[in-house]
Amino acid sequence: MNFRKFLVPLFLALFACESAEKIPPNTIVIGLETGPNVLDPRFATDAVSSKICDIIYSGLFRRDKNLNLVPMLAESVERPNETSYIIKIRKGVHFHDGRELTSADVFYTFQSILDPATASPKQSALSPISSMAAPHPYTLVIKLKKPYAPFLGNLTIGIVPDGSGDLTAHPIGAGPFRFQNYKRGERLYLKRFDGYFARPAVLDGVIFKIVPDETVRLLELKKGNVHIVSNPITPAVLPWLEEQKNIRIMKKIGTNVSYIGFNLRDPILKNLKVRSAVAHAIDRKAIAEHLMKGLVVETESIIAPSNIFYNPHLEKIVYAPALARKLLDEAGYPNPGNGKPRFTLTYKTSKNPTRKKIAEIFGEQLRQIGIKLEIKSFEWGTFFADIKSGNFQVYSLTWVGIADPDIYHYIFHSSSVPPNGANRGGYSNPALDKLLEAGRRESSFVKRKAIYDEAQKIIAEDFPYVQLWVSVNVAAVRANVKRFELYPDESLDSLVSVRLED
């Protein structure tokens, strides 16, 4: 279908019957596909909820636009030994309801997350904690069960007031924007918090307008009812967007990395040469250019290139069908001839149209080396349940927002098979296990970088995953929006600096 021919008459028809909405002065409107599920940082796991919680609440630390860990509520950190942290809390920080934020609030937030009765999905992030104490209103003392180098990176969770129940209905944080109202399925309205401890926002407010249909979201952007539309933007609409006056397209490489995963318990896929053959049969470049319109970039690691722990020296996975066929021959799967496949693999995916199209392309590319790919698509819940339980041969998913390389322990350490982690394919490598354990103990950046450079190399050579691509974050922004920045992790922190021109 010619997308432009379809959109233009639709736009004209809608322009004729709709008038512009009234937006409060100095307020920016951001178009969203879905609204946040929760507005309590202890329970926020989906991307939209997490991003919005980050501007309502403040954590002890935050990742900046270069993914570096920077202090927020934490004024300083002392380490008397490898398992102890003395954190000094900023003075003069207030919640949106006027209460001063103290170490008691930090203690309560972390304690409530660790309490099994709370059932917080953030519990594992704080599980290294052995004990906590708040001996002074501006001092928190944390002791760990054992040395854990990535620990401070887990303290980006937003702090809530002492004694808070679930705050989703009426969030109270200490971030730059305060909750005004939320009509589910329609819009969330935040106002500037003038008492913010750092520089207050320039904007008076932010409205997150929920518009599930992408075509309608783009129409609202063109009309000026919406100022920003960002991920997800379907690659097919980019050419049309780039032609629009008063709209600029912003792109920045992100942190979301897509991959093909294998079940290494499978009698076919436990063979490294088979997994390597699959890797060399996939034409990632063609998919990135023609289907994804440049909104993905090939990568060899689940650590994105924007991350300081990324290893840029990994051997590139080349598209080489002849090599792939040779590897299958050597693996004991010769071509039977007469159009018959060497063997059949079942590939599971969701019902997302782009995911299904990618699966079809994979199927055709694997067919060319003699592998039949049987594609099965499911509703998201069913699909993800199968992946988590190990009920698959081959699948594809995306790791979202990886910041610290300790994620490798969660995904690839032999002890991290579900439910203890996400080693869903049953990968086991004693040499890698030792590296990942050392990486958790090592506090020196230089030494940690060397450890995880080697870990990435091992994974790239063993192919428990075929790394596909890292996403490119994209935003379509009205020309009168100034100082908006795209962050690799899709953070909305730049909204503090955004201003609107008349």
Image (cartoon, rainbow, N blue to C red):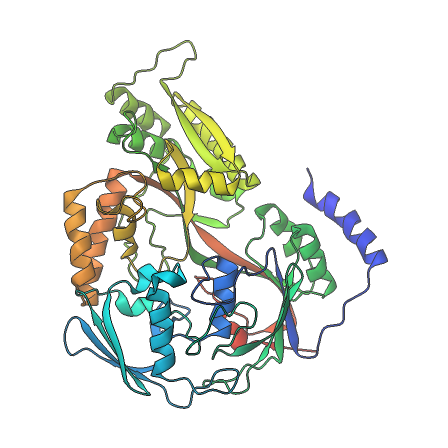
Q: Is residue 250 left or right of residue 328?
A: right
Q: Farthest residue to the bottom: give it.
A: 92
Q: Is residue 493 visible?
A: no
Which residue is located at x 82 percent, y 64 percent?
A: 19
Q: Farthest residue to the front: give it.
A: 117
Q: Position of residue 469 (x, y in %)?
A: 41, 46
In the displayed structure, 7 sits above or below 42; it is above
Q: Position of residue 171 (x, y in %)?
A: 53, 73
In the displayed structure, 386 sits above or below 104; it is above
Which residue is located at x 39 percent, y 74 percent?
A: 59
Which residue is located at x 51 percent, y 70 percent?
A: 167
Q: Quadrant of residue 161?
A: bottom left
Q: Is residue 257 visible?
A: yes
Q: Quadrant of residue 417?
A: top left
- Image quadrant holding the N terminus, namely top right
Q: Farthest residue to the right: give it.
A: 16
Between 403 and 82, the one nearer to me in the picture: 82
Q: Is residue 34 left or right of residue 149?
A: right
Q: Position of residue 285 (x, y in %)?
A: 44, 41
- Image quadrant holding the C terminus, namely bottom right
Q: Position of residue 80 (x, y in %)?
A: 15, 79
Between 16 and 211, the one nearer to me in the picture: 211
